[in-house]
Image (tube, grey):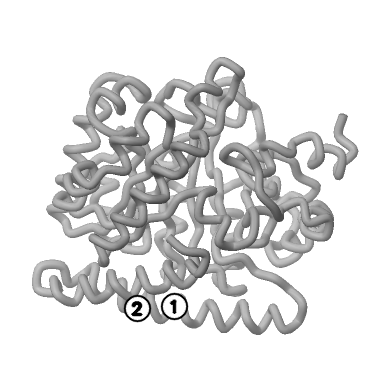
Amino acid sequence: MGSDFNLAEYMSNGIENMVKGAMKASLKNPKETKFILKYSLSVKEAKKKRDNLQEKGENVPVFLISSITSSCNLFCKGCYARANKSCGEGSQKKQLSSERWKEIFNEAKDIGIPFIVLLGGEPLMRKDIIEKAAKVKNIMFPIFTNGIIFDENYLKLFDKSRNLLPMLSIEGDKSQTDNRRGEGTYDALIRLMDNLNRKGILYGVSVTVTRENINTVTGKDFFDGLYKKGCKILIFVEYVPVTEGTKYLAPTDNERSILEKGQQKLREEYKDSIFISFPGDEKYSEGCLAAGRGFFHINVDGSAEPCPFSPYSDTNLGNTSLRETLKSPLFRRLNETEMLVGEHYGGCLLFQKESDVKDLLNIK
């Protein structure tokens, strides 16, 4: 993949290719076709809104990452969220109400944000918020779930609300997935994929890339098996080590090279699917996309953070509008100091520069 690769353009073309694919299968999948056609128009309208604000000197990112709950029903090995106490029984943060999340979703629609990623914990443990998201049709909500509590009621909700996009977390083959996520997880995911495919619901998968699974997850056989079950999106997320003892799992330059080459081959073969790697694809955007450059993270308590791996904040959406939050002093200083630009070692630039971020906030 050359230096002329444009991530935003690739995403836009990917949506158009999915529209074409949906059109071909319209007799089989009319609900998805109808939604994707309408949503592709919403994306264009959202861009106009962002462009208008850009002319006023206000940068609006293309997507948000929102952690809507700190609760989770699994205990995955090496989990970053549990390690930093942002998820699990040790997290005591006050959580935003579903009504405030509804307001944030609508504020995002008004300023032209077309994607909001929903994370946890396990986001399906907050059905009240998922139901609020379902009603904001102009926004697509990729929901990163382990799939374990995705029951028949959720299947009905996702079938009715096509702007909810299931992103199933999988680690590779059966042994790799069960080893990290628990016995039986892989079989549960396969059953869920079959149910989603039977309903014609668009879905994708998310893979945490480590030195142990890199060759499996970048291979044609891995995605081909998913593709035949209806999967159209594959997101690679480089593993971020939570302790010294897990650093050996983090991808090195060798694994990143394997990932980039494998991803490019998949892009060439599956034209109606989308393949993205984080933070790998960020280098084509001349640096990290956090702190509002391309996205920012909303924590469960409303804290506006540069990204999930840089959990520091000076602004809270519990009492600040989304538009004002984008003017956060921390975000502004991160951009002005060009801390988000340049080469770095490891999966996340701001994770590597944690002490510098703390200095901006005078955190000791």
Examine the rendering and report whether any part of residue 126 can be seen.
no
Which residue is painted at 55% across and 70% down in the image? 109
Q: Is residue 194 left or right of residue 185?
A: left
Q: Is residue 351 left or right of residue 166?
A: right
Between residue 215 and residue 181, name the one nearer to us.
215
Total residue callouts: 2
Q: Amino acid at mark 2?
A: Lys
Q: Amino acid at mark 1?
A: Ser
Residue 317, above or below 140: above
Q: Are marks 2 and 1 in contact (CB under 8 Å)?
A: yes
The circle on residue 42 is: 1
Which residue is painted at 12% across and 53% down in the image? 198
Residue 1, above or below 277: below
The circle on residue 38 is: 2
Which residue is painted at 67% across and 59% down in the image? 292
Between residue 149 and residue 197, name the one nearer to us.
197
Which residue is painted at 40% across and 45% down in the image? 259
List the single residue furthest toward the top: 245
Residue 350 percent coordinates (x, y): 69, 43
Between residue 271 and residue 19, name the one nearer to us.
271
Label 2 and label 1: CA atoms lie apart by: 6 Å
List the single residue furthest toward the right: 362
Residue 165, by quadrant, is: bottom left
Residue 23 percent coordinates (x, y): 19, 77
- At mark 1, the secondary structure is helix
Residue 188, by quadrant, is: top left
Residue 181, above or below 3: above
Location of the C terminus (image quadrant)? top right
Residue 305 percent coordinates (x, y): 69, 47
Residue 26 percent coordinates (x, y): 14, 74
Q: Is residue 4 left or right of residue 334?
A: left
Residue 271, above or below 308: below
